[in-house]
Image: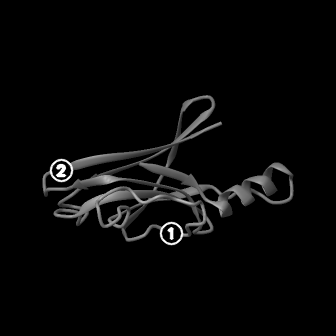
Amino acid sequence: MATARTKVYREKLARAVAGLAPMPEITHIAIGTGGVDQQGKPKSLTGEETGLFQEVLRRTVTPSLPASTTVRYSLAVQADIDGLADKGINEVGIFDADGDLAAIKTTTTKNLESTDELEFDFDAIF
């Protein structure tokens, strides 16, 4: 499993902390099927990624604050309703209001059957 905050996101964060630009909100979570190599191992990440390797679903997200220093972005999916049945999910990313990838995670593949329901949580810890 690999996780990376992107260079673009880190640059935006630095500008916002310096008071040079506003920080765009995280608005979407996307999931995909391209996060593993030919051997089925999660791909390594560099932080230079600009999108998922093979995005299959993107949805608007509403943040929550489960702790005073944690922002959680969640997405619940139902394989049959969301068109994910028979797909192997192995990557997830969060995107800001500008459409830029803020963070990405690759994992081993979870093959979804039509009755499967999954929830993806991305925590930003400050």
Name the mark on residue 51.
1
Left or right: 9, with 34 as reference point? right
Give the residue at x 81% y 60%.
21
Residue 82 picture location, percent across and down: 26, 62
Nearest the viewer among 106 and 71 is: 106
Q: Locate the C terminus and report the quarter of the image it occupies.
A: top right
Up/down of 118 relative to 10, above or below: above
Give the residue at x 66% y 61%.
7
Give the residue at x 56% y 69%.
50
Which residue ends up furthest to the right in the rendered image?
19
Give the residue at x 49% y 59%.
28
**Which quadrant holds residue 58?**
bottom left
Left or right: 114, with 99 as reference point? left
Q: Residues within 10 Å of mark 1 (few under 14, many from 20)?
A: some
Determine whether the residue tagged by mark 2 lies in a helix, strand or loop.
loop
N-term-proximal mark, 1 vs 2: 1
Q: Residues within 10 Å of mark 2 (few under 14, many from 20)?
A: few
Name the mark on residue 125.
none
Determine whether the residue tagged by mark 1 lies in a helix, strand or loop.
loop
Left or right: 15, with 64 as reference point? right
Mark closer to the observer (1, 2): 1
Residue 66 picture location, percent across and down: 51, 31
**Which quadrant holds residue 97?**
bottom right
Residue 90 picture location, percent across and down: 33, 57
Q: Which residue is mark 2?
A: 116
Q: Amino acid at mark 1?
A: Gly
Q: Could you tell me how far apart the alpha carbons at marks 1 and 2 are, in whole angstroms?
A: 25 Å
**How many marks do you count on the picture?**
2
Which residue ends up furthest to the top in the rendered image?
67
Left or right: 68, with 89 as reference point? right
Q: Amino acid at mark 2?
A: Asp
